[in-house]
Image: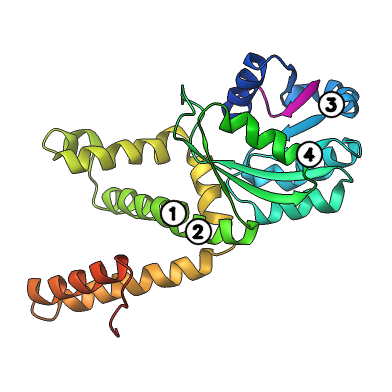
């Protein structure tokens, strides 16, 4: 059995290539400079994974999809699922699966790690891919691509947007992160690690995660509204009003209703 990984020379693609090699499969991993070999090999692969930056995933899928033969499997590993799954269904005749591993390429074990599967077309390779992760201890979550992207808007988009606001605010205040860490609390040290990840290690990845989520407008609206509520609370009897808002929010996070603004 031959498996191809477009974008298999770095990041999650490289991680997946290592896993598949350990399982005994013949793995072809292609980077940007190996397009000709990729085009020659893809038709002989039973499964083809696409693991490329989010901003080019649809473009790559449109190119790769027609090369994957009917009866084989085409899967992507991107952090958004609605557009990639729709693109795979449109541009290929193969079975289609959208996969989102909820972890990064540095993990050493899959035990307890979560992987989202979005059905596209077919059952054979969906079952095979699920088994690949389950046998290593991963927890499989299956959901509709649209539902996945809305949940990621709350989990990824809102989280990274918050980190970006913190970083931009510190920058506008003229603060050096190194100097602040000299007197930082444990909570700030954790946030500083996230700042380094977002602003230093991979700003391209995180800017794409925020900018390309289809629910960005709604999240920005909610985020701005939340800042407004906090600002108004601070202007109305300071700590007391803010504490009331926090208690109200806690009830909402526990599953209860949020009182009127």
> Which region shows up in magenta?
1-9
Question: Magenta includes 6?
Answer: yes
Residue at the image point whose x is 88% and y is 27% from the top: 39
Residue topped by disc 4: 124
Q: Residues within 10 Å of mark 1 (few under 14, many from 20)?
A: few
Q: Residues within 10 Å of mark 2 (few under 14, many from 20)?
A: few
For mark 2, give the secondary structure.
helix
Residue topped by disc 2: 151
Of residue 214 and residue 28, the one placed in the foreground of this image is 28
Residue topped by disc 1: 155
Dot placed on the residue nearer the N-terminal end, 1 or 4: 4
Residue topped by disc 3: 45
Residue 138 seen in the figure: yes
Check whether the beta carbons of the residues at disc 2 and disc 1 lie within 8 A of each other.
Answer: yes
State whether residue 47 is above or below residue 87: above
Residue at the image point whose x is 13% and y is 71% from the top: 243
């Amino acid at each position: 059995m031959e498996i191809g990984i477009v974008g298999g020379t770095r990041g999650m693609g490289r991680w997946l290539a290592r896993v598949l090699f350990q399982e005994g499969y013949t793995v072809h991993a292609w980077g940007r400079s190996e397009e000709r070999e990729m085009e020659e090999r893809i038709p002989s692969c039973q499964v083809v994974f696409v693991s490329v930056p989010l901003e080019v995933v649809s473009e790559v899928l449109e190119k790769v999809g027609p090369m994957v033969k009917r009866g084989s499997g085409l899967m992507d590993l991107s952090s958004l699922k609605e557009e990639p799954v729709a693109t795979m269904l449109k541009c290929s005749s193969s079975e289609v699966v959208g996969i989102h591993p909820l972890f990064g390429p540095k993990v050493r074990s899959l035990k307890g790690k979560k992987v989202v599967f979005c059905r596209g077309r077919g059952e054979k390779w969906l079952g095979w891919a699920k088994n690949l992760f389950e046998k290593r201890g991963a927890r499989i979550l299956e959901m509709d691509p649209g539902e996945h992207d809305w949940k990621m808007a709350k989990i990824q988009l809102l989280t990274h947007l918050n980190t970006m606001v913190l970083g931009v605010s510190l920058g506008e205040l003229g603060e050096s992160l190194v100097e602040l860490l000299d007197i930082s609390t444990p909570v700030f040290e954790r946030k500083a690690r996230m700042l380094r990840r977002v602003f230093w290690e991979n700003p391209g990845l995180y800017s794409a995660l925020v900018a390309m989520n289809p629910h960005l407008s709604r999240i920005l609206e909610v985020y701005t509204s939340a800042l407004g509520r906090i600002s108004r609370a601070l202007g109305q009897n300071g700590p007391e009003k803010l504490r009331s808002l926090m208690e109200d929010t806690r009830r909402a996070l526990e599953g209860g209703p949020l009182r009127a603004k």
